[in-house]
């Protein structure tokens, strides 16, 4: 299953590298997208849970890497206001 690494820019200009174990992330984000942080978190939850489910369907177990990435996103997102803008730089 092809994985995807993507780069996001946080409201303060910091760039973060993110990971999805599945190309399903392309259904939720496109390079150049900009959105409030709250929306980014929600879309990340949806996308990474779907990616983990794809792994489960194919291999019989959920993807802990997808859940680790979601946990990281939720962790560093606490430092910002939910209406701050996040941009998808590379996908």
Image (cartoon, helix red, strand yellow):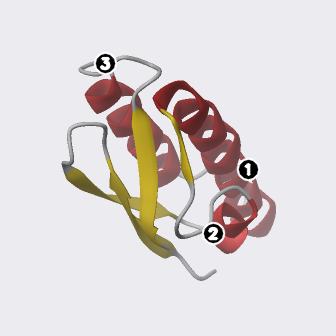
Q: CA distance from mark 1 to mark 2?
A: 9 Å
Q: Taking 56 as reference, is 78 left or right?
A: left
Which structural element holds mark 3? loop
The residue labelled by disc 2 is 22
Query: Which is nearer the eye, 43 or 22?
Result: 43
Residue drawn at the location 63% of the way across and 69% of the way down:
22
Q: Kindly report which numbered mark, 1 or 3, lies closer to the viewer in this rendering.
A: 3
Q: Residues within 10 Å of mark 1 (few under 14, many from 20)?
A: some
Residue shown at 61% from the left, 36% from the top: 45
Residue situated in front as seen by the camera: 37 or 75: 37
User: Mark 2 or mark 3, which has the lower sequence index?
Assistant: 2
Disc ID at residue 70: none
Mark 3 highlights which residue?
Answer: 78
Mark 2 element type:
loop
Q: CA distance from mark 2 to mark 3?
A: 26 Å
Q: Disc 2 or disc 3, which is closer to the eye? A: 3
Identify the residue under disc 1: 50
Residue 39 in the image, given as x and y percentages of width and height: 60, 32
- Residue contact between numbered discs 1 and 2, judged by CB atoms under 8 Å: yes
């Amino acid at each position: 299953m092809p994985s995807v690494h993507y780069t996001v820019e946080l409201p303060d200009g910091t760039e973060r590298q993110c990971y999805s174990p599945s190309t399903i992330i392309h259904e939720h984000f496109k390079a150049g997208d900009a959105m409030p942080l709250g929306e980014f978190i929600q879309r990340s939850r949806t996308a990474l849970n779907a990616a983990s489910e794809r792994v489960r369907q194919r291999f019989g177990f959920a993807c802990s890497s997808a859940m680790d990435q979601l946990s990281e996103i939720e962790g560093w997102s606490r430092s910002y206001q939910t209406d701050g803008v996040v941009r998808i730089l590379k996908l």
